[in-house]
Image (cartoon, rainbow, N blue to C red):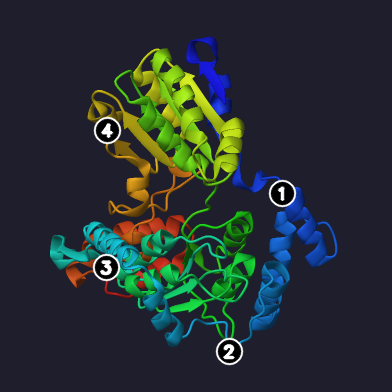
């Protein structure tokens, strides 16, 4: 893991350390390359794989979905077993531990309560001469949500995608999730889906799932928007289908950046850095502090805690590749560097964390103080954990209720209101050479113009 003193580096050098490479520059591992060659018969890039899958699903529908599920994931399904049945939902409920079920329900309640406060309002106001202007906030009709599956078990991802959609008023929430080798879906995933308001669940993952949601098949309905994180193939597929439907964002590897001073507990910081490092080897864990003593203690604490983790090898590789400690002259410089990074998760563990909050410009979510660790936001606090990554917090927002809504403008002018502005409208229309636009005003009684 790198340790850098800001005073010994130029801003260009620090930028290079803090700005992440584009998500589509990920280099596939040898295992992935070998599997691609086996499935497709030649060496293809990730983008080429995605383009072929999308083309085939668009042309062949469920047939292609089933073929790729078998070829890529090694799972044999049929049109009759592609969708999760009511019996499977009921059986799942009997298999989930009561404590897990209680935690799922509490998380759903917290997420629902928080997102209910985000609901935008439809409004209409009177203007001069009896004109009315306003805005209508309308939920999308049908959305699709992607949830990682197979060996992964992420009921929290189900909750964070489905509950805001339900709060927004979406009528149909279609979920896709890769099945296990035996064609089943983890019970916790199914219970979270049923409890969160998901309408239908299909056993399909990867680019084929995104294509099916974007274009529709005989079995899987076409949706208006696709949300949810996935691997590089899922992300590239979302990028490719954008325009045929909407998407939430283009997600990359998990990341955390912690701004801390000498008052911080090094064991807290190490634990929080490892909470992201254990995701995968591409995850990023960064500490920026004005205390060299704290930096040394955190480095030692990371080694102590690392040895106790079940996913030690992944976390260790992540820290080696993407771990970073930067020592700054003060906390304000630390925040300035954090804004350059625009992290998915930003923790501020300083003596007065709220004093730094107004200076935060780019972050997916901000966690203030020593008792607001990132995993609290992942699971239970209530705000959404689907956050912009790879520096895209500069322009993306956290997934929220408005992600699943659209705004429609309302314009209602009276005759007097139209006559009051007719000359200006006609002038602008004719200046643009659009006479029919001008005539649409003239025929409504402005004969003297």
- Residue 400 versus residue 191 in the image, above or below: above
Question: How far apart are labels 2 and 1 at the CA level?
Answer: 34 Å
Residue located 29% across and 20% down the image: 263
State whether residue 126 appears in this view: yes
Which residue is labeled 3 in the image? 411
The CA span between labels 1 and 4 is: 38 Å
Q: CA distance from mark 3 to mark 1?
A: 52 Å
x, y (%) of residue 247? 49, 61
What distance separates the C-alpha of mark 3 from that of mark 4? Answer: 47 Å
Residue 353 on image: x %, y %: 26, 28
Q: Quadrant of residue 93?
A: bottom left
The image position of residue 434, as x and y in percent, is 47, 63
Residue 36: where, in percent of width, then height?
77, 60
Please tell me whether mark 4 sits on a helix, a strand or a loop: loop
Asked if 433 appears above or below 334 in the picture, the reply is below
Looking at the rendered structure, which numbered label has been put on residue 28?
1
Q: Residue furthest bottom?
A: 80
> Spatial distance from mark 2 to mark 4, Cα to Cα?
51 Å
Q: The C terminus appears in which quarter of the rendering?
A: bottom left
Q: Earlier in the sequence, mark 2 or mark 4?
A: 2
Label 3 and label 2: CA atoms lie apart by 49 Å
Q: Return the residue found at the far right.
A: 42
Q: Which mark is residue 369?
A: 4
């Amino acid at each position: 893991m790198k340790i850098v003193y800001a005073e010994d580096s130029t801003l260009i050098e620090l930028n290079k350390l803090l700005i992440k490479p584009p998500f589509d520059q990920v280099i596939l591992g040898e295992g992935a390359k070998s599997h691609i060659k086996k499935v497709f018969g030649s060496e293809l890039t990730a983008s080429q794989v995605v383009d072929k899958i999308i083309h085939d699903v668009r042309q062949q529908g469920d047939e292609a979905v089933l073929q790729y599920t078998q070829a890529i994931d090694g799972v044999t399904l049929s049109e009759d077993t592609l969708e999760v049945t009511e019996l499977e939902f009921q059986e799942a409920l009997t298999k989930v531990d009561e404590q897990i079920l209680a935690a799922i329900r509490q998380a759903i309640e917290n997420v629902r309560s928080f997102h209910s406060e985000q609901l935008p309002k439809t409004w209409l106001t009177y203007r001069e001469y009896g004109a009315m202007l306003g805005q209508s906030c309308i939920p999308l009709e049908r959305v699709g949500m992607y949830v990682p599956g197979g060996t992964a078990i992420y009921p929290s991802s189900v909750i964070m995608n489905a509950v805001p959609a339900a709060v927004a008023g979406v009528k149909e929430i279609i979920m896709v999730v890769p099945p296990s080798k035996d064609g089943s879906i983890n019970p916790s995933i199914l219970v979270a889906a049923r409890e969160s308001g998901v309408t239908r669940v299909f056993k399909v993952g990867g680019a084929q799932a995104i294509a099916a949601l974007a274009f529709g098949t005989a079995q899987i309905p076409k949706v208006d928007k696709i949300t949810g994180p996935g691997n590089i193939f899922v992300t590239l597929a979302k990028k490719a289908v954008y325009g045929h439907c909407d998407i939430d964002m283009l997600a990359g590897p998990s990341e955390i950046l912690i701004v801390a001073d000498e008052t911080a507990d090094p064991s807290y910081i190490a634990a929080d850095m490892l909470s992201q490092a254990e995701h995968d080897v591409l995850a990023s864990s960064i500490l920026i502090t004005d205390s060299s003593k704290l930096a040394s203690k955190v480095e030692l604490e990371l080694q102590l805690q690392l040895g106790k983790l079940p996913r030690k090898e992944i976390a260790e590789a992540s820290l080696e590749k993407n771990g970073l400690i930067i020592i700054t002259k003060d906390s304000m410089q630390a925040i300035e560097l954090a804004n350059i990074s625009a992290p998915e998760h930003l923790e501020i563990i300083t003596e007065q964390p709220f004093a730094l909050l107004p200076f935060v410009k780019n972050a997916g979510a901000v966690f203030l103080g020593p008792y607001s660790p990132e995993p609290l936001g992942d699971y239970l606090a209530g705000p959404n954990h689907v956050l912009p990554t790879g520096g895209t917090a500069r322009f993306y927002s956290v997934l929220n209720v408005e992600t699943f809504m659209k705004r429609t403008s309302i314009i209602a002018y009276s005759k007097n209101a139209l006559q009051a502005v007719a000359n200006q409208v006609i002038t602008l229309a004719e200046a643009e050479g659009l006479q029919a636009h001008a005539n649409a005003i003239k025929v409504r009684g402005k004969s003297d113009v």
